[in-house]
Amino acid sequence: MVMLQYQPIEDALHLELIAVLFHKLNLLSQPPTIFPPVEMFTFEFQNIENLKNGKIKNIKKQLLSDNWYTLNKFTFDYQKEDGSWETQQREAYDRGNGAAILLYNKKKGTVVLTRQFRMPTYVNGNEDGMMIEVCAGLLDGDNPEDCIRKEVEEETGYQINDVKKVYESYMSPGSVTEILHLFIGVYEDRMKVGEGGGADDETENIEVLEYSFEKALKLIAEGEIKDAKTIMLLQYAAINRVFN
């Protein structure tokens, strides 16, 4: 059972956010138009289900932001090696799980990658903010296989059928909940059904790239490819001799 605790906070959360949260918790049949303006509250969740680590207890989850995806603050008790307990706090960003794929053409010896602007990299040392990556996207309720087929067509213009899952990975386990499902898949020129570039409503502005496999590996060594999922899948292809 999930229990709610309320505690006043001094910094101002928007009333609309609280109303939406009540609605999401099914405490109200519809978002209210009037909410008491006197006190603000944070919401902490106890007894989170399906967690099996006996060294973790009294987990409380506090919503910090759901402006784009969801940022939560977790407070919990952790049992140390000497048997004593200490209270810890961590923040976790929940954007859902995702899928990524390396498209390859064995006959041509090529791979299809993408290039797009990534603001977080731009504000952290990437001079132009552009990143070369494999095709990828969030699941948004789809299973990983269906998701990645859809993303391939939206981003690259290729319509593929067969995909092979090679592994899954937590991409930033210290702060992000996302599990990324990683695939490889064959593309051929005849599979091209559109220009790609991303979905019109997602403002992605994606450039489609076709490189030789050797050049893609060289771009990793030269520091031109810095995206983790892309490096992982290209190295998978090299280690497992996908092109041999």
Image (cartoon, grey):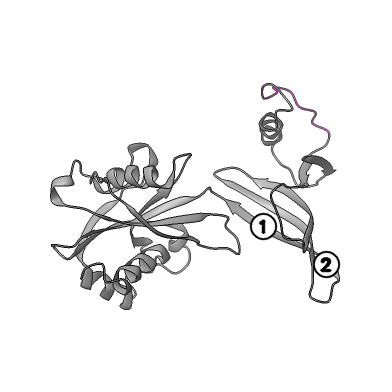
Helix, strand or loop at disc 2? strand
Q: Quadrant of residue 44?
A: top right
Disc 2 marks a residue whose amino acid type is Glu
Judged by depth in the image, the label closer to the viewer, 1 or 2, is 2
Q: At x 44% / y 63%, what residue is drawn?
A: 121
Mark 1 → mark 2, Cα distance in angstroms? 17 Å
Question: Foreground residue, 30 or 181?
Answer: 181
Q: Earlier in the sequence, mark 1 or mark 2?
A: 2
- Place of residue 208 in the rendered image (x, y in percent of width and height, measured from the top left): 24, 54
Magenta residues span 30-38
Question: Is 198 above or below relative to 187?
Answer: above
Q: Is residue 127 visible?
A: no
Question: Is 244 above or below relative to 1?
Answer: below
Question: Foreground residue, 32 or 25?
Answer: 25
- Place of residue 8 in the rendered image (x, y in percent of width and height, measured from the top left): 84, 43
Residue 36: within the magenta?
A: yes
In the drawing, what numbered circle is on residue 91? 1
Judging by the rendered image, the residue that carries numbered circle 2 is 86
Residue 206: within the magenta?
A: no
Question: Is 59 above or below relative to 159?
Answer: below
Please give left or right for residue 62 compared with residue 191 in the image.
right
